[in-house]
Amino acid sequence: MSNMWWLSIPIIITLFILLRKLNSRIQSPLLKAISNPVFLAITIFAVILVAADLSYTRFYQHSQLLSWLLEPAIVALALPLYQQFIHIRKNALLILLSCTFGVINATVVATLLSALFDVPVHLAASVAALSVTTPITLLITDSLGGIASLAAAMVIFIGLLGALFGFMLFRILGIYNHQAQGVAIGTACHAIGTAAALNENTSIGAFASVAMALSALVTALIVPLLYPFLSKALL
Amino acid sequence: MMKTTQVLSYPVLRYLISSALIIGSLAAAKTIMHLIGGGFPAPLLGMLILLSLLLCGLVKEQQLLPCASPLLNFMPLFFIPAGVGFIEHLGLIRQHWQFLTATLIFVPLSSLILISYVIALFKGRDHNE
């Protein structure tokens, strides 16, 4: 087995492409959310490694080339952020304020829950930056001293929950405004939620894309300053 | 001497320029973070540097596309290896499953309610134009 680890990257790429093709063919919004290729790929590799008692460290070492590409990819996020920014100038302030409230709320609620459940500090840091897309949460959680992979899994689950139940919640709340629904889904439920929003309505999807990009920016600026303050006060 | 438009018509050169802009922003961010020694993630600072260059008009959208498009298209692939890492903490997850479940429910629920209410306050609750 030891000389088979070099297959890690080809297997990850092949599986991801296959899962993405499968996901693109699915029409039902419910199945589309559950068959999210990242969610399925992470689940499949996790099950294989645990069931076969294989070392995660070896798996990570041999697929590190993919992780290195994450850094330039995050820099490249400036492009969709810019593309969205120039289209929302009219509503920019309200959307920016809403995203900021959402990001602060997510960090405050997560830290309050950490204090309530009296969890270890590194677990509290792992849930401090959940209102942001997965690649950004990996970086921020790492910089806060949390478990980045756990935060990534949490963010993906939150996206799935948002995609499955987000619009049901809006119906219960009686909120049908596209901007309100889109910005809320984009900020709270990131990429998977945004994909569900695009499925629901293009206008809601556009607002969700803007909010997702802006919350990445807001989280990067606010959470590294807010969380140390909150953890000192509450944990 | 070749004009800029002629240079940009070569796909390889366009790709190299696009890559240089992204790698250059990342390198600048890493240098800044190394010099000031803060805990802010360098790729995020790199993203902000590149966004500033775009907003100032010093870098054009078209110049970034050749390298940025494939990077963004395959970005989910890049965090799969790190995402699998949660299996290293299964004991911790089992021990604190109530906390993690509460976080999974209350963090997005409170954010969805708060944000949608804030916007509905200014824009109304009904379908908009």
Image: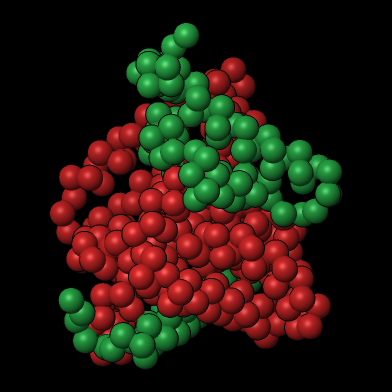
Chain colours: A red, B green
Judge whether A218 appears above or below A232 on screen: above
Q: Residue at x 77, y 76 (%)?
A: A229
Please tell me which residue lies in front, A47 or B125: B125
Q: Residue at x 58, y 57 (%)?
A: A137
Judge whether B49 appears above or below A177 on screen: above
Residue at the far top: name it. Answer: B1
Q: Quadrant of residue A201?
A: bottom left
Please tell me which residue lies in front, A14 or A58: A14
Left or right of A179, for residue B1:
right
- Residue B7 location (% of width, % of height): 42, 16
Q: Residue at x 28, y 63 (%)?
A: A205
- Residue B92 location (% of width, % of height): 66, 63
- Residue B111 location (% of width, % of height): 47, 79
Q: Residue at x 83, y 49 (%)?
A: B36
Left or right of B48, for residue A82:
left
Q: Please count the marks in the image.
A: 0
Please tell me which residue lies in front, B53 or A131: B53
The reply to whether residue B85 is visible in this rendering is: no
Quadrant where the C terminus of chain A sits is bottom right
Q: Quadrant of residue B60?
A: top left
- Residue A188 location (% of width, % of height): 45, 70
The reply to whether residue A85 is visible in this rendering is: yes
Left or right of B29, for residue B51:
left
Judge whether A129 appears above or below A43 on screen: below
Please tell me which residue lies in front, A185 or B129: B129
Quadrant where the N terminus of chain A sits is top right
